[in-house]
Amino acid sequence: MSKDVFITGCGSYLPGEPVTNDAMEDHIGRIHGKPSLLGRRALRWNGIETRHYALDSDGKPFDSNAGMSAKATEAALADAGLGVEDLSFLAAATTQGDYLVPGHATAVHGALGKRSMEIASFQSVCGSSLMAAKSAWLNIRAGEHKIAAACAGEFSSRWFRPSFYEGTALVDEKGRARAEADFLRFTLSDGAGAILLEDQPRRDGVSLKVELIDIVSLADRFDPCMWAGASVENRAAISDGWSISGPLAAHAQGAIALLQDFELLKRVIRAWVGVYLEKVDVKRIIPDSVDWLLCHYSAKSLREEIVSLLEKTDAMIPQQKWFSNLPRVGNIGSASIWVMLDEFLKSGRLKRGERVLCVVPESGRALVGFMMLEAV
């Protein structure tokens, strides 16, 4: 018989001081020393006002993805009144870890130290957070572990330094970066978040009973929409990727940088909404039973598009039930949902008996995940 599982702690870590819109391009570096043609438009589109970077304005790192992920995990443990010595299973998620090999979880475990434990690494884009959470959840449900952590971290800013673009096919003869590369430089930032899961609720305060975690991939329907490791033109041809041509040739082709196809994204948004409506149709999700919605989205314009699609259905969750911290902390990829949940829980808004729906769409090669929680 499977066990109930509860989130008993939540933690986050945001490096450095908040960086404003006026300072951000100088902080990550201007390509060929010139201002971006798309930057201001991207900032209006995403609605982000401040974000955090683990690089200083000279491009020197003062933390690592693993270090930030470990700090968030320690914060989640402390929130539950526990320490690293109590942890027996760690699932770690990221878009791009500190190493190509080995996996992100090994680096996070190394940063945590103190004891041996079982680990699992999950690499995707934003949805990798729920992949890690589901792994931890199922391990406890099966009785394999009593205390598990799921963390997610991103160090996106190091991939946005001018050297990733200068001298490549991503920049034209006038020094202007392609939109597929430039928009993301103004959208993604750094940080980490984590949740702690146990087979018993905490003795004091509110715990979150995990009712479901569903993840649906749409990779059978779409080419990559957000990717690194292939050129814009050849992103669907895995045999032409960076590992075949070699790192130097791939860099010249613009195949190393993180890229986004915004035209394809418009189609992906509709597919995300379609999956949600399917969940509603089969009563896996009942909108009227949801008291709070924490939906990760990369930009306020995407939220507006999602809302416009849902308002035409009976599945819309009223916007007064939505919680987001995107303007303050930015889009931290896979870490966003845990950083959001941590701030929401510490806001004191949640009451026992209320249900929280977490939704994590991922453009990557398109997937969307759902997690339903009940406050107990």
Image (cartoon, rainbow, N blue to C red):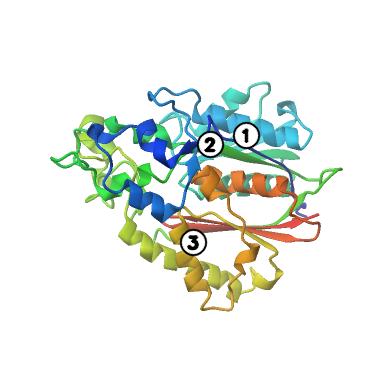
Query: Which residue corresponds to the image point at 38% horizontal and 44% vertical from the top-left?
Result: 186
Q: Earlier in the sequence, mark 2 or mark 3?
A: 2
Q: Residues within 10 Å of mark 2 (few under 14, many from 20)?
A: many
Which of pointers 3 and 1 indicates the residue nearer the eye?
3
Q: Name the residue under label 2.
A: 191
Real-space Cα distance between discs 2 and 3? 22 Å
SS category of the residue bearing label 1: helix
Kindly identify the residue that appears in the image at 62 percent across and 29 percent down: 71
- Seen in the image, is 64 located left or right of residue 116? left
Q: Name the residue under label 3.
A: 303
Q: Which amino acid lies under the numbered mark 3 shown in the image of this protein? A: Arg
| Gap in angstroms between the C-alphas marked 3 and 1 | 27 Å
Residue 174, given in percent of the width and then of the height, sits at: 15, 40
Q: Where residue 145 appears, x then y in whole percent? A: 72, 40
Q: Please tell me how crowded label 1 is: few (under 14), some (14-19), or many (20+) other residues with Cα within 10 Å.
A: many
Classify residue 370 by image quadrant: bottom right
Q: Where is residue 341 in the image (x, y as percent from the top left)?
A: 64, 48
The tag earlier along the polypeptide, 3 or 1, is 1
Establish if 67 lies above or below 310: above
Numbered disc in front, either 2 or 3: 3
Mark 1 touching mark 2, by CB under 8 A? Answer: yes
Type of residue at label 1?
Ala
Q: Which disc is residue 328 wearing?
A: none
Q: Residue at x 54, y 78 (%)?
A: 313
Q: In 3D space, how far apart are the residues under numbered discs 1 and 2 (Cα atoms)?
A: 9 Å
Asked whether the beta carbons under mark 3 and mark 1 sit within 8 Å of each other, the answer is no
**The C terminus: image quadrant:** bottom right
Q: Mark 1 points at which residue?
A: 72
Farthest-out residue, front: 22
Image quadrant containing the N terminus:
bottom right
Q: What residue type is labelled 2?
A: Gly
Taking the image as drawn, is residue 222 in sight?
no
